Every structure is written in structure tokens, then in C-alpha cells.
Amino acid sequence: MKLLAGLGNPGRAYEGTRHNVGFDVLEILARRAGQPVRRQRFQSETAQVTIRGCPSLLLWPLTWMNLSGAGVLAARDFYKIDTADILVICDDFQLSTDTLRLRSSGTAGGQNGLADVLARLGTTAVPRLRLGIGPVPAGWKSADFVLGRIAPADKAGMDVLRERAADAAEDWVALGIEAAMNRYN
């Protein structure tokens, strides 16, 4: 089984914000899988799907972004999923809005939700898919920027990026990290 964890903040107040693009990508994957039944477990909302023939678990942590690792760890331990079979999908304000970045390991790069996942799993060798939402405009605090809504002028471009990210996640499931990195980085 593969575990795809999309990071974001729960609640209507955060829908449509830059920080919730990880949730948005999971919504696309759920739609493509025929809107499977969702359950609340592991301090998260989950949906079991099949992606290109592979059983997969979509996981939306319902903790705040900075505590996202709790749900990922609980699901990993319950299903006995190898860390290499976990994909964390999150925003990155250091990447421009037309950029995807897949990596098999590395630091959190300032993304606090990803940092919590890495700390709780006890390794930096966790595959991740980052969606560019930046750069932070001059004079803005990064927290205000990531929690801000996507501007109407940027919506079409972000819609394309989220669909590409869902494609990349599906390729990661079916082809593995190296092939997906070669295709999308």
C-alpha cells in the first residue's frame, strides 16, 4: 500500500489558501478515483483508493499544519507501510508558482508540516512533492502569505499546477520516485 499525505489546515477558513495545496491535490486524486468513502481516523480524514492498480491511502491530517506528522505516523504504523512508500504533498513558498519538485529525501526547507512529519517518522528519507506557491512578495510575512487566498489572477495557473501534481503523484505510485522525478522536476 502507498500512503499519500496532503498537508494543509482543516476548516473552511483555510480552504483556497496557498498553504492548503496539499489538500487540494488529494481532492483531485479522490475525484479521479470516483470520490471514495472517507473515514476519520489517525487524527485525519482518509480514503482508500486504487491508483493505477496499486492500493493507496489518501490522508488529510486534521491537526494543524505544524502537527501533520501525527496522522502520517499513525497510518504508517497501522498499515506497516515502508517510509519509501509514503509521499508527502505540500506547498513551498521558495518555489515559483509554476514549479513542482519531487525528492526522495532531504530537509524540510522551512515547511513546518513537512518538518513535523520528518521528526515523527525519525528520518529525512521521506519522499515529498512540493508545489511552488512563491515567491513571498516584498513586505509580506511568510505566514501571512501562505495563509492567504490564491489571487483570482493566479487561480488558473494554480489549477494547472495542482492537476500536474496529481499526475506526478500517480506516476510516483505507478513508476516510482526516480521515474517521477525525471518526468516532473
Image (cartoon, helix red, strand yellow):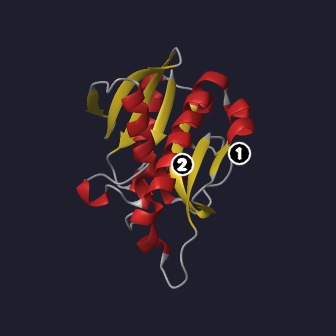
Judged from this view, the residue extending furthest toward the top is 53
Q: Is residue 120 visible?
A: no
Nearest to viewer (mark 2 / mark 1): 2
Q: Is residue 24 visible?
A: yes
| In front of the other: 17 or 142 | 17
Q: Position of residue 90 (x, y in %)?
A: 51, 50
Tell me the kind of residue under disc 2: Leu
Tell me the kind of residue under disc 1: Asn
| Structural crowding at the residue carrying mark 1, measured as other residues with C-alpha within 10 Å and reported as few (<14), some (14–19) or many (≥20) | few
The answer to which of marks 2 and 1 sits earlier in the sequence is 2
| In front of the other: 60 or 121 | 60
Q: Residue at x 48, y 78 (%)?
A: 141
Q: Secondary structure at mark 1?
A: loop
Q: Position of residue 103 (x, y in %)?
A: 68, 44
| Structural crowding at the residue carrying mark 2, measured as other residues with C-alpha within 10 Å and reported as few (<14), some (14–19) or many (≥20) | many
Q: Which residue is mark 1?
A: 185
Q: Position of residue 33 (x, y in %)?
A: 40, 24
Q: Which residue is mark 2?
A: 161
Q: Secondary structure at mark 2?
A: helix
| In front of the other: 40 or 171 | 171
Q: Residue at x 41, y 53 (%)?
A: 20
Q: Residue at x 42, y 49 (%)?
A: 68
* In this view, 166 is above or below 148: above
* In this view, 127 is above or below 154: above
